[in-house]
Each structure stands twice: as C-alpha cells, then as structure tokens.
Amino acid sequence: MVKQHTVTITDNASGKSIECPVYEGTHGHPVIDIHGVTKELGFFTHDPGYATTSSCSSTITYIDGEKGELLYRGYPIEQLAEKSSYLEVCYLLLYGELPNAEQWEDFKNFVKRHTMVHEGIRRFLAGYRPDAHPMGILVGTVGALSTFYHDALDVHDPDHRNFSAIRVIAKMPSIAADAYKYSIGQPFMYPINSLGFVENFLQMMFAVRAEPYVPNPVAVRALELMMILHADHEQNASTSTVRLAGSSGANPFACIAAGCATLWGPAHGGANEAVINMLQHIGDPKTIPKYIERAKDKDDPFRLMGFGHRVYKNYDPRAALIRQACHDLLNDLDSGGSLGPLFDIARTLESIALKDDYFIERNLYPNVDFYSGIILSALGIPLNMFTVMFAMARSVGWISQWTEMMEDKDLRIGRPQQLYVGAARRDYVDMSGRK
C-alpha cells in the first residue's frame, strides 16, 4: 500500500478542512484514509453494509467485477483451475506462494496426518437429533474443536497459528462427511491417506464398510474444480465475520465457526440450493418460456436464481470454468438417461438464457452457483448439505484471511460506529406517572 496523494475534505457548515491521504493498492480502487475525520471535523462516515469501505489491507484475493477477473495471490483463477489442485491452492492461499517439490510433499503429508478427528467428536455428534440440519452440526462441531485441540491455541504464536490452520483444512472434510453420515444413520468412514484430498472426501461421504468404493474421476474433477473456485472471494460477509471475530483474539476454531454461521444465511451461502429449488419449481422444460417471461416482468416477484452476480458486472469467471466440468459430469452420469428432468430443465434454461437479448444486455449470465448446484445435485449430495460443501471449500480462505490478519501490525479489535436514531435523553418516570 503506497501513499499517492491527499484529498481535502471540507465541512461547509464550519469551514474546517482536513487533508486525508489516499493509498493505491496493486489493483483496484484507491482508498481514502479517514482516520482524522472524526478528530478534526467531528464526523463518522456512514456506509450500510460496508459496501464502499475498506476494512483491511490484504494480499490474498483480488476481484475486478467489471472485467470479470479473480486472482488468488496474483494468479488468475483460470490458470489455477486448469493446472492446480485444491490442496495446492490451499498452500498458495495460506503461504502466499506456490510450493516447490519439497514443500509440496511436506505439506501434503502434514495435512494427511491430521485428517482424522478425535473420537470424542463423533460421540459429540450423537448429541444432535438425527434430523438436525448439517450446517447446524458443522457450526457447533467446528466451534467445539477448540475443546479437543487446545494444545495450539495461542493466537500470537506463529507455529500455533500454522498448526491450527492445517487442522482446519484437514478436518473440515471429515466433519462434513460425518455430519452427512450421521443424518442418514450410516457408520462413519475414516480417511484413507493414500487417496487424494477430494477423493478422500467422496469416499468418506459415500463409501460403506460392506463394500469397496471407487470414486468416479469425472466426479472428482468436477468437485475439485468447484472447491478451487470457492476457496476464497475477498472480504465477503463470512470472511469479514471471521476477521471481526478474530480481531478480539478469539481462537481460530471459534472464528471459523462464526464464518460458517454467516455462510448459513440464505443471502450468502444458499444460492446454489436456491437454484435447485427453482429448477424443481419449474418442473418441466416445456414451462421454461413461461418462467423466462415472468423473470422479465419487473412486477412479478419471480426471479431466476443463479443468474448474474452482485460483484461481477460481466461474466462470472468461475462460471466459465465450471460450466464445462458440469456438462462433462452430466454427460458421464447420464449415459443411461437416468438423471431425470431436473437436468434437462437446467440445460434448456442455460441454452435459452445464453441466447436471449434480455439476459445478454443485462449481463445476466449463469453464475458459479447455477453450475455448482447442478454438480452437487448430480453427485447425489442432498440440498441440506450444499452449504456445508461451500463451507468446506471456503475454510482455507477463512483461515488464510485470519492468519494474515493476526500478522497485521495494524490489527485492532473491530468496532463499527452507528448513526443513533432512537429516543433523545429522557428521565425515568414511576409507574404511577406513566400514561
């Protein structure tokens, strides 16, 4: 972050002015440092949702919504999606550089040694109702990790921070799979260290002890790509929550649990689930034109889910990458025509939207949630597990952001201000004097 110049902010009522420094990052909009505004002019700034506020400086992820660009540590997501693996992306996000051969072997082995969870955690799961939502289980279990792994919770110790980060990356797939197995009443499966990271997760999800399980390589590729694309996404709601919780000195597992809780909100992590609900609501490819017209009607509350994006004003670069993997998976699994009408609806809807002038003019292209929802459904993952899958992929981004924040010399506890619009000061009145 380099200071470029200053801007003058003037209070027209009092005539007072202040010079505020302007800083330029590697990419993106410059930021104005407003530290002195309150002291010199007596004002706070008001920014609901923090939509135009920079809360931190970061070296991890950059998004250019106008260009449709996503960078992890400077690397274009297109290159990582084509050439990398999810676990290598984990190393990149956590440490800032791609690993050399020795670092890669050490990292893989370190993660593999920590994929198992404490047996007490599985007894802990038995306390939940069998029909408990898996995200509720995930939030509670991740938060409880600090009670099982309290040997490395000194947030000021770099070695402790790194150890906890590895535990988060390694154990999230095990916890996610255990939540699923518990919900359907099947025995838990243990990780197999000879398998790749994503293959291991799939076998913990879908293998049973009575017979061998061989993951479909097309399914592995589709899920791995989806996890790479969801690994981090700048200062979104859940990442900001992780940072805010961490600013108080809370342990990393509590911070990740807070991120999971925020992701659980339907406005954040539930978009891919909403896509499947929409496709089920449409019900038949023949009715799609009717729903297309409803989507165009500004007076109709119906909306096509999985189209457009708040940040990306052009095409979502993640969608462009995951689209082919989605099609490959559907073609592979549908060789016997067994997938049913849901995926016919998805294919038809995508085809129409990509050619319709209304959607093209408004950049309402299918986004990553559209394709990831279809992929997860095609893999046999139930709707109530969709956000769990998102959390599992995003956990490396959360813990990387937390680690970066803990190493920031400017770290201070988060404490947003407010615009108070309640009652003015007043005096207490006895019950007998109240109207």
Image (cartoon, rainbow, N blue to C red):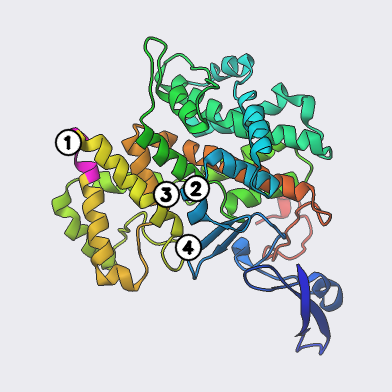
Residue 118 seen: yes
Q: Residue furthest top?
A: 210
Quarter of the image where the N terminus is located: bottom right
| Cβ atoms at labels 2 and 3 below 8 Å apart | no
The foreground one among 188 and 412 is: 188
Q: Tell me the SS state at disc 3.
A: helix
Q: Is residue 16 above or below residue 144?
A: below
Residue designated by label 1: 337
Measuring from the top left, give residue 158's x and y in whole percent: 81, 39
Q: Is residue 121 above or below residue 414?
A: above
Amino acid bearing label 3: Ala
Query: Residues under labels 1 and 3: Cα distance?
Result: 27 Å
Left or right of 285 on screen, residue 280:
right
Measuring from the top left, give residue 207's x and y in whole percent: 41, 19
Q: Is residue 351 magenta?
A: no
Amino acid bearing label 4: Arg
Label placed on residue 310 = 4
Residue designated by label 3: 271
Query: Residues under labels 2 and 1: Cα distance?
Result: 32 Å
Crowd band around label 1 with a 10 angstrom C-alpha radius: few (<14), some (14–19), many (20+)? few
Magenta region, residue range: 336-343
